[in-house]
Image (spheres, rainbow, N blue to C red):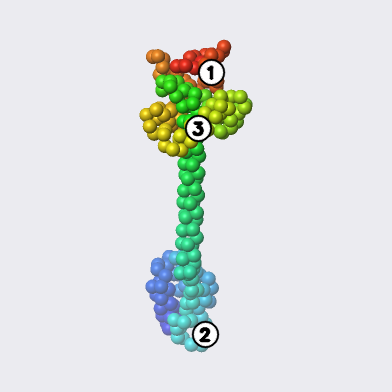
Amino acid sequence: MSFKKYFACLLVMSFVISSFGTVDASAAEKLVAAPAIFHDEVVTGSVVKGIALCEDVQSDEVTTGDMVTVDEIKVPTASADKVLADRRKAQSASEKKAKKIADQKKAAKKKYKKALRLLAAIVYCEAGGQCYAGRLAVAAVVMNRVEAGGYPNTIRGVLWQPYQFGPIRQGKMARELRYYDQGLYNEPEREGSLKAAKDILAGKYTVNYNGKKINLKLYHNFNGHLSNAKIRISGHDFA
């Protein structure tokens, strides 16, 4: 190998090292020693294509363009339109979720108001003159039936089940519902019945009566006198 070719090889090595970092010793020896054309030589993790080193050609000059050709690295970028579209999509999904939650809350609130109205009215009809424990126990029986098998699964269904609640047949319930709508259940005479209804809907099924703690979840029937009564609270037997 002539001095010019050897010097050209050194220049090529210097260019490759400066462009791609360090080259290990064995790779450097190959680049210097081999008067051949190398393709796809791996240099510090990068593939360098079309490296012509010390090619046995007439000219002793090696140009930079002859030595190295590196493929262009393309990095995909999201367009502004796509970014905006993604943001609108996420915002739309968030708004739909918020609306669904708001609708569920609204429906639950409406259901609660209907339940409270019916319970407060039947409690006053059946136990309006009794103590708090007696009123709470009547409300508990209604809700226990709603949750038990063998009865309708709504408060209205339980109350209007044939031959179950006298105030329904007698028209007293209809009158109390009108009074409820007129705001009379916020007055002293009926507010105790409203409180009992609210407490049962809040899940309060335990009451103290005559020094004894009573679990009202156990009862599905009440009347002035029951042959199979388990407990008597105020003016009613419960079973």
| Number of the front mark, 3 or 2 | 3
Q: Residue at x 47, y 55 (%)?
A: 95
Number of numbered discs overlaid on the protein picture: 3
Q: Earlier in the sequence, mark 3 or mark 2?
A: 2
> Which numbered tag is attached to residue 57?
2
The location of residue 160, given as percent across then percent down, is 58, 30
Which amino acid is tagged 2? Val
The kind of residue tagged 3 is Arg
Q: Is residue 83 above or below residue 216?
A: below
Of the pair 124 and 66, the residue shown nearer to us: 124
Q: Which comes before the other along the chain, label 3 or label 1?
A: 3
Of discs 3 and 1, which sits in the foreground? 3
Amino acid, disc 1? Asn
Looking at this view, name the residue that lies furthest to the left: 188
| Residue contact at pointers 3 and 2, CB within 8 angstroms | no
Nearest to viewer (mark 1 / mark 2):
1
Q: Residue at x 49, y 34 (%)?
A: 177
- Discs 3, 1 touching: Cβ within 8 Å: no
* Residue 147 % position (x, y): 55, 29
Q: Disc 1 to disc 2, how far (Cα)?
A: 117 Å
Percent of width and height locating residue 158: 57, 29
Instruction: Answer above or below: position of 106 versus 73.
Output: above
Quick one: SS at disc 3?
helix
Task: Answer left or right for 138 relative to 195.
Answer: right
Where disc 1 sits, the SS reads strand
Name the residue that disc number 3 marks. 175
Q: CA distance from mark 3 to mark 2?
A: 114 Å
Q: Which mark is residue 223?
A: 1
Q: Residues within 10 Å of mark 2 (few under 14, many from 20)?
A: few
